[in-house]
Amino acid sequence: MPESRVTSAHETGSDLHLELSPAGPRRAAVATALREAVRTGRLAPGTRLPPYRSLAVDLGVARNTVADVYAELVAEGWLTARQGSGTRVAERVAAKAQRVPKKAPGNESGAVHNLRQGQPDSTSFPRAAWVAAVRRAVSAAPHDAFGPGDPQGRPELRRALAEYLARARGVCASPEQIVVCAGFAHGLRLLFGGGVLSGPLAVEPYGLPFHRTILADAKVRTIPMGLDEKGARTDRLATQPGTSSRHGARAVLLTAAHQFPTGGPLHAARRAAAVDWARTRGGVVLEDDYDGEFRYDREPVGAVQGLDPDHVVYLGSASKSLSPAIRLGWLVLPPHLVDGVLAAKGMREAWTGVTDQLALAEFIESGQYDKHIRRMRRRYRARRNLLVAALAEHAPHIAVTGVAAGLHAVLRLPAGTEASTVKAATWMGVALDGLAEFRHPDAPEPHQDGLVVGYATPPEHRYRLALDALCRALPPLPDT
């Protein structure tokens, strides 16, 4: 078995892991291990190696042995050595066969233009303000913040969220009703996978397939409702098959502020119908407020949770407002569900880091979160306007809907053209999704062809090019 040694690099603070063969001379073993680390790409070009004295101590070999190996590999071209720069892996040495071409960030398809929904503009993340919030929050945090994590979440963040959600979203909650999680999907897993709630679950006819998969893995049957211009048909919950029988649904999942992905808020009467149904059934409404802060041409639509905090679970996250890389979400729970969710999470926090929780609390309380939301609202409105203008000029026969709020729009297509249009967009280098990708397989109404276009994702300097390519992929005006 090869012997693994890890240096502590006493003089530089850098570590270097080498696997030395136990057989043969030490000099040959060190040289072979270094060549292999460079050849495979584990030591990338430009990597600085520890001084030979440090490496010799940690490997348990003579200093001259490592010095001679460094000199040998410099002569062979594997390494370079300069006064004041130390010994480094040569820039021209690379394991090209081991490398995988990089794709654009957040663009798994490798397309030139990413118009997929669900992602904010990553180039607009408020780096300087976030770094400042981290510094202030960590400096002011009590010592116990850096102990074992509380599964309910840091009290600083829960207090900040309770104040913000009440002010900005009309949510009625105390910090004790809030449980911090790692996002909406994690919240679903806690509620259903953790046994807090059980199925069947009434859902909207369109939604993220990923969420349906989570529910299916938890053995939860989903029952799609109807949908019209007023939103999900919650007015039919009391009579819809599968939702009114003795063994029917005891919960309903809604994107009330901005139906995903078709757009539009849930009508006030439909909101009231959902709450009344939950009260009558002894059930619960799950409210996914995924992009409620972003509205453009209408008055803000508050959360359904404010109508009945005892029968509504409010779920939110920082994925759209800040970044999906900040794995932070929150559940605002009826008091009787809090203990069950905490039991599902376990004794210690296993998902969300304390530093990010403290930073987000500081970001909210300092006013930077509101400032960032307002800035991004202006930016996304401008992008939305460019999309609408491009369609009006180049494809006036294509209706665009769901544009009063959110980070995406739906382009309505002629019947039978969705699949071919998605294919044409791919040929144009545009990554997007057809509306059918989000349709529940048991949805009651016939499918209407369309595209779901995310206008938040592309970087600013490429957005107009993306719109040009999109318009070229759209079906032409039918002959009249």
Image (cartoon, rainbow, N blue to C red):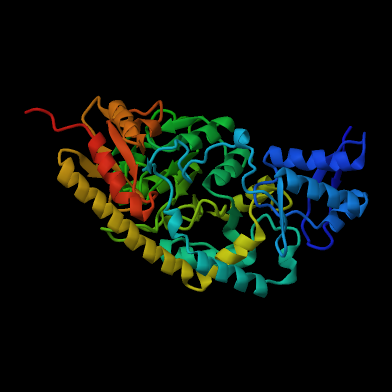
Using the rendered image of the protein, determine whether residue 4 is visible from the camera's viewpoint: yes
Give the quarter of the image for residue 372.
Answer: bottom left
Q: Where residue 426 sits in the image (x, y, percent)?
A: 35, 32
Q: How many marks?
A: 0
The quarter of the picture where the N terminus appears is top right
Q: Where residue 366 sits in the image (x, y, percent)?
A: 51, 74
Residue at the limit of the structure toward the left, as seen here: 480
The quarter of the picture where the C terminus appears is top left
Task: Say whether residue 71 is left or right of residue 293.
Answer: right
Using the rendered image of the protein, determine whether residue 402 is visible from the camera's viewpoint: no
Decide: is 281 above or below 151: above
Q: Which residue shows up at 75% across the image and 53% down it?
A: 49
Q: Where residue 293 sits in the image (x, y, percent)?
A: 39, 59
Q: Where residue 41 sits in the image (x, y, percent)?
A: 67, 41
Question: Which residue is at the front of the view, 70 or 216?
Answer: 70
Give the quarter of the image for residue 15.
Answer: bottom right
Q: Which residue shows up at 54% across the image and 52% down it?
A: 325
Question: Which residue is at the front of the view, 278 or 64?
Answer: 64
Decide: is 436 above or below 29: above
Question: Which residue is at the front of the view, 48 or 130?
Answer: 48
Residue at the limit of the structure toward the front, as seen here: 75
